[in-house]
Amino acid sequence: MTATAAPAAEKSTYRPLELFDTDRLLDQDERDIAATVRQFVETRLKPNVEGWFESATLPRELAKEFGDLGVLGMHLQGYGCAGTNAVSYGLACMELEAGDSGFRSFVSVQGSLSMFSIYRFGSEEQKNEWLPRLATGEAIGCFGLTEPDFGSNPAGMRTRARRDGSDWVLNGTKMWITNGNLADVATVWAQTDEGIRGFLVPTDTPGFTANAIHRKLSLRASVTSELVLDNVRLPASAQLPLAQGLSGPLSCLNEARFGIVFGALGAARDSLESAIAYTHSREVFDKPLASYQLTQEKLANMTVELGKGMLLAIHLGRIKDADGVRPEQISLGKLNNVREALAIARECRTLLGGSGITLEYSPLRHANNLESVLTYEGTSEMHLLAIGKALTGQAAFR
Ligand SMILES: Cc1cc2nc3c(=O)[nH]c(=O)nc-3n(C[C@H](O)[C@H](O)[C@H](O)COP(=O)(O)OP(=O)(O)OC[C@H]3O[C@@H](n4cnc5c(N)ncnc54)[C@H](O)[C@@H]3O)c2cc1C
């Protein structure tokens, strides 16, 4: 008689993403990067986030800590950047956003908007001047595209750059600019006689002012600003030489949107894990909340959406690493994953009852943050229209 191995004991409880076994789709380097960022979020960020959210601050010294962690411009090659693949960058965004969307926003703007605009469109001198310092967090960057009257339709921007001899003179106002008051350099997009062009504006240039936007109900652990350019005079060397037209800023936005496809799932995962833990400890009608069918239906439905979002994110990341992901594919990911993450965070809040409205639990903080994430980097409506255009060939934006 031959002995047969006993069947592996069935696991009684899983974390939501363990059910999907998505870790199998990652290589060891990718898992290590995710674990390193998660550890930093658990030990350095999570213990402080409630205070930062409540006081509406993001300490400047975090920039250097993010630099030491290696996440600033991590998907770029050279100039002190880590040169990881897109999936690793996405996983880092996910872990950061499990802490708070404000942390991921800082890293997205620094790496995918400020640094990427210089990396893709800058001269060698501009790259050498800014990228190494931005990668370590010694310098902070911001990205000024949106204006008070032009958000979804940036082509209408009124900020203008005119030539004066060999100099450029910039006038205009930018609105809702992440990191605006922290930044040492702003990538500013402006109309010129030759169309839209990008400029690197050191924030100590006379005529440049950043005004912090207060009383936000969302993304409170993040700095958001209005930028005013009043006859800001720049040398010719401040122009990004390779950026021509709106495709310049839009290609930077695609980079940042990719990070959001993963990032939003971090907020959803953290909300769900927090809610599951609560349903075990909370007793209602003499039994744990976790034991009720209505609770389990909510948890199961949320887990299904979280896992589907993760599969989509990894799929888009693999496409991006193989031969490039198309903007309309990024729209699919951003639309779905932010929409579902917001629905998950709200549903988790219901499971927490009254406790869910305090800062002690993360889901409502995540939901409030995700309201901004739903709007920035292209509103959900703009991404619906982008997908609609891809399907029908008809642009319905106007
Ligand atoms: C916290 C935060 C941080 C941000 N950070 C940055 C940053 O760092 N840099 C930057 O440049 N910008 C930034 N933004 C700006 C953001 O990208 C814009 O808010 C966004 O593009 C929407 O623009 P808007 O606010 O002007 O809204 P609007 O464009 O006025 O849109 C209002 C509503 O109208 C809808 N809408 C617009 N056009 C159409 C249409 N054709 N058909 C149907 N519906 C339509 C929109 O979907 C939305 O629901 C940030 C915003 C926030 C909230």
Image (tube, rainbow, N blue to C red):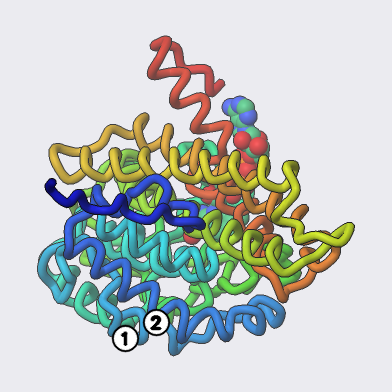
Ligand 1 location (quadrant): top right
Camera-side residue of 12 and 158: 12
Q: Which of the 4 image quarters holds residue 140?
A: bottom left
Q: Position of residue 324 (x, y in %)?
A: 19, 38
- Check contact, mark 1 vs mark 2: CB within 8 A: yes
Q: Give the vertical position of 313 relative to 9 (above or below).
A: above
Of the 4 image quadrants, the one containing the C terminus is top right
Q: Is residue 211 left or right of residue 183?
A: right
Q: Position of residue 44 (x, y in %)?
A: 46, 86
Q: Give me the residue at 28% from left, 32% from top.
A: 326
Q: Which residue is mark 1?
A: 138
Q: Is residue 197 visible?
A: no
Disc 2 packing (10 Å; few <14; some 14–19; many ≥20): many
Q: Is residue 29 left or right of residue 175?
A: left
Q: Which of the 4 image quarters holds residue 61?
A: bottom left
Camera-side residue of 201 and 220: 220
Of circles 1 and 2, the one toward us is 2
In the image, the residue with mark 1 has its CB under 8 Å from the nearest atom of ligand 1: no
Q: Earlier in the sequence, mark 1 or mark 2?
A: 2
Q: Give me the residue at 31% from left, 66% from top.
A: 34
Q: Position of residue 81 (x, y in %)?
A: 18, 71
Q: Which residue is mark 2?
A: 63
Q: Give me the residue at 42% from left, 48% from top.
A: 19
Q: Amino acid at mark 1?
A: Glu
Q: Amino acid at mark 2?
A: Ala
Residue 391 circle label: none
Q: Is residue 281 left or right of residue 155?
A: right
